[in-house]
Image (cartoon, rainbow, N blue to C red):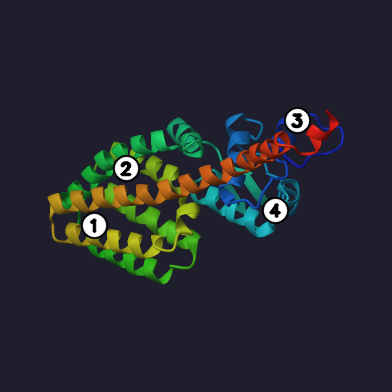
Amino acid sequence: MRSLEVRAGDTDGQSASEQLLRPLGRATLPQEIVAAIAELIMRRVWRPGDRIPPEKELAARFNVGRSTIREAIKSLVIVGVIDSRPGDGSFIRESQSALLSGAFQWGMLLTERNLSDLVDMRVLIEGECAARAATFGSPDMAPRLVRMVERMQGERYRPQEFMQLDNEFHAEIATAARNALYLSVSNTIQSLVSVWYIGTFRLEPTKAATIAEHSAIASAIQAGDALGAREAMRRHVVLAAQRLQKVLNEENVDQAAPARRGKARRGRVGRGGPADTCA
C-alpha cells in the first residue's frame, strides 16, 4: 500500500500529482475534482491499493471547500473507483474490468458527439433489458422496482442516496433480463452516467422527472408489457440525455466566458486604451 501524501523530496509521481491537484480557477463542480482524480488513475500515477491524500489536503490543493471534495469522493465510491474505509482513509480499488476503466475515462470526456453514442447504446441495451424483464422477470421483481421508486421519492434532496437507488433500479432490470453480458454492459453504462449525475441532479426538474420515468418503466414491467417497457425505457434514456445536454451546454458557456472577456478587453485596448497612448 502506498500513501499518496506528497512529502518533501518525494519525486515518485509528484510532478503529475502537482499538475492535476492544483487550485481550480473558479467555483467548481465536483465533476472537475472527479476528472482530475480520474486522470491520475488512468495515468497510473495513483495505482490500485494506493491511499489517496486526506480530504483536508485535497481541499487545500484544489482550493475548494471540504464538502466539494467529500461529494466528489462519494461519487467515486459509488461507481466503484475508490474504497472508503472509515478510520483508515480512501483507497484506489483494484480494477474489476478493463471495460469499466475505459468507460470511466470516456465519461470524463463526455461531449455532445459521444452523448449521442451513449444514448444509442442505452436505448439498445437497456430497452432490451426492460422488455426481457417484463417477459422473464420473477413475480417479486416488479414490486421491488415499485418500492425503489417510492424510496427515490423520499430521497429527493439527498443526491448520493438518490443516485444509488437509480443505479439499483437499472441493475435490477438488467439482472431480470437473464443475460450476464447485458448485466455487465448495463453496469458499465451506469458507471458512465454516474460520473455526471451530480451535475444533472442540481437541475430542479430532474428528480420529479426521473421518478415519473422510472415509475412508468416499473408499471409496464409489472403489467408484463414488453413493448411498453421498452418504450418507457427509451423515453427515459432520451429525456435523461436532454437533461445531461443542458449541463454540458452550461459547462461550455462557463469555459468560453473567460476567453470572451479577454477578447473584449483586448478590443478595448486596441480602440484607444492605454497601449495606444504609447505610440
Marked residue nearer the N-terminal end (4 or 3) = 3
Q: Which element type, helix, strand or loop, lies under badge 3?
A: helix
Q: Which element type, helix, strand or loop, lies under badge 1?
A: helix
Marked residue nearer the N-terminal end (3 or 1) = 3
Residue in the foreground of this view, choosing between 221 and 115: 115
Q: Position of residue 35 (x, y in %)?
A: 58, 41
Q: What residue is pinned by disc 4? A: 64
Marked residue nearer the N-terminal end (4 or 2) = 4
Disc 3 marks which amino acid?
Answer: Ser
Residue in the foreground of this view, choosing between 171 and 276: 276
Residue in the foreground of this view, choosing between 178 and 5: 5
Mark 3 and mark 1: Cα distance apart in space: 49 Å
Residue drawn at the location 57% of the way across and 40% of the way down: 256
Mark 2 and mark 3: Cα distance apart in space: 39 Å
Q: State left or right for residue 202 relative to residue 113.
A: right
Q: What residue is pinned by disc 1? A: 217
Disc 2 marks which amino acid?
Answer: Leu
Q: What residue is pinned by disc 3? A: 15
Query: What quarter of the picture does the N terminus occupy?
Result: top right
**Of circles 1 and 2, which is in front?**
1
Position of residue 278 relative to residue 240, above or below, is above
Disc 1 marks which amino acid?
Answer: Ile
Q: Which element type, helix, strand or loop, lies under badge 2?
A: helix
Label of residue 203 in the image: none
